[in-house]
Every structure is written in C-alpha cells, then in structure tokens.
Amino acid sequence: MLFFLLLLTFSSTSNWQPDTYAVVQEESIVAIVTHKAGIASAFAHNHLIVASAYDLELSMEEGNPQSILVSVSIPVDSLTVDDPAIRDRWAERIAELGLEDDLGTPSEKDRSKIRGEMMSRKQLAATDYDHIVAESTRSESGDIEFDCDAAAMNVTLDLTIKGSTHPVTFSTCSSLSADSLFIEAVGHATFRNFGIKPFSGVLGTVKNRNEFDIYVNLVAIKQAGL
C-alpha cells in the first residue's frame, strides 16, 4: 500500500506532461513553393503560396525534441499568392535551402488571376474542400537535408488536401531558448497525389511542375501550465 501511494505521488509531481506552445504567426510562415516548367517557362513564374491564417497545436516534452506533436488546420481561403512583403522577407532563406532562388513577381492583376485558378475545381476546389489539415504521426532523430546546429529529426505528417491524405516527411530542425521554440522544416510532395492538376497553359508550353515544396518556419512561445 505504501509503495502504491508513493507511486501515485511521483506520477502526480513528475514533469512527464509535454509543454504546449502558441505560434507567433506574424513571425512565422507556413508556405508552398511551386516551380515553373515548359519550353516557355521564361514567361512564367515560380510561386510562394502562404497561409495567412491557421490553427496550429504544438507540444513537446522538455529535453525530448522527438516527442514533438503537431496538428494544423489551414482555411483554403486564407492562402495568398506571391505577396511582395512576404516574398521579400523569406526569399533569401528559401533560396539558401535550395528550394527556389527565383520567386515570382507577378502584377496584382496576375496574382488575383493565379489565385482564382488555384481555387478552381481543377486545383484546390475550395468550395468543396475548405481546409487543408495535417497531423504528425512519427518523429525520428537523424540526418536531414539542410544544416542544423540544434535537434535534427525527420517528422512525418499525414497531410490532407482536397480530401486526399498522404504522408509527408519533413526535414526538421528545432531549438529551444528560454520559453521560445524555433522550428524550421522542409517537405516535398506532388500535386497529382492530392488530385490536383498542375496549371498548364499555352498548349503546355507554360506550366507548373507536379512537384512542390513545403516550407515551415515557426516561432512559438511556451504556454503557462494549468
């Protein structure tokens, strides 16, 4: 009986519960990078598509980066295309990571046209599928595709776009400073896996590649315990 009471006391006081973090969205980015293709690609653009709003739940046990749990829901209507201020802020880092060194600079009119095409039934079908969601399923320490001076790991998420769900593994680097958690992650996927037809125009001479990159850079603040 005494052993049982001691066990209960230890369980109630030990710090086994993961810490939860709130993402500072104005300091963070959740984005897709698309790539132009076709024999007339010189007249096309690579695109930076960014979620301007999202609900993201993030937790991690102190001292155990591999315990990270992530769940995110992105309203499709929140997606922006080639926002000049966002592009200027993140373009250098995206180029350093080898994702794309020539992000597009389309006019406001063209940006609106591109976004309209993106929301169409051929692509995101936004009227039928109004959210993109992802949830982590596995995290393992190991080598990743970019330099990381902190905790390097491969984090797999089930990503659902347009009603189709597929696993995507992200090269992830995380670091903790006081109550701030910093996460940078890169993943890769294909449009056709999610039932999306990449844009193609002018008889296929201007189009998007099937492959796209996902770039995430988060600043999060530890939340006070209950």
Image (cartoon, rainbow, N blue to C red):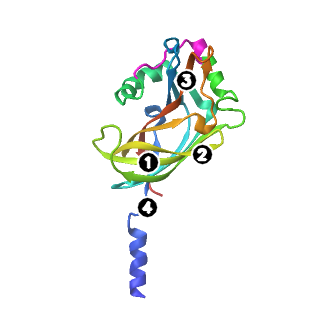
In the image, residue 74 lies in the stretch drawn in magenta: no
Q: Nearer the viewer, mark 2 or mark 4?
A: 2
Q: Which residue is mark 4?
A: 17
Label 4: how many Cα within 10 Å (few below 14, some 14–19, many 20+): few
Rounded to the nearest angstrom, the CA distance separating label 1 from label 3 is 27 Å
Amino acid on which disc 4 is placed: Gln
Residue 226, given in percent of the width and then of the height, sits at 48, 58
Q: Nearer the N terminus, badge 2 or badge 4?
A: 4
Callout 1 touching callout 3 (CB < 8 Å) = no
Eye-nearest disc, 4 or 1: 1
The structure residue drawn at horizontal position 36% and vertical position 55%, both measured from the top left corner, is 62
**Residue flagged by tag 3: what amino acid is it?**
Asn
Mark 1 surroundings: few (<14), some (14-19) or many (≥20) residues within 10 A: many
Residue 37 drawn at (x, y percent): 51, 20
Which is nearer the N-term, disc 2 or disc 3? 2
Indicate the position of residue 14 as horizontal and vertical percent values.
38, 67
> Is 102 a magenta residue?
yes
Earlier in the chain: of badge 3 and badge 4, it is 4
The residue wearing badge 3 is 208
- Residue that badge 2 annotates: 165
- Indicate which label's residue lies in the foreground, 2 or 1: 2
Q: Judge from the rendering whether residue 144 lies leftward or rightward of residue 164; answer left or right.
A: left
Which span is picked out in magenta? 101-111
Q: Earlier in the sequence, mark 2 or mark 1?
A: 1
State the SS at label 2: strand
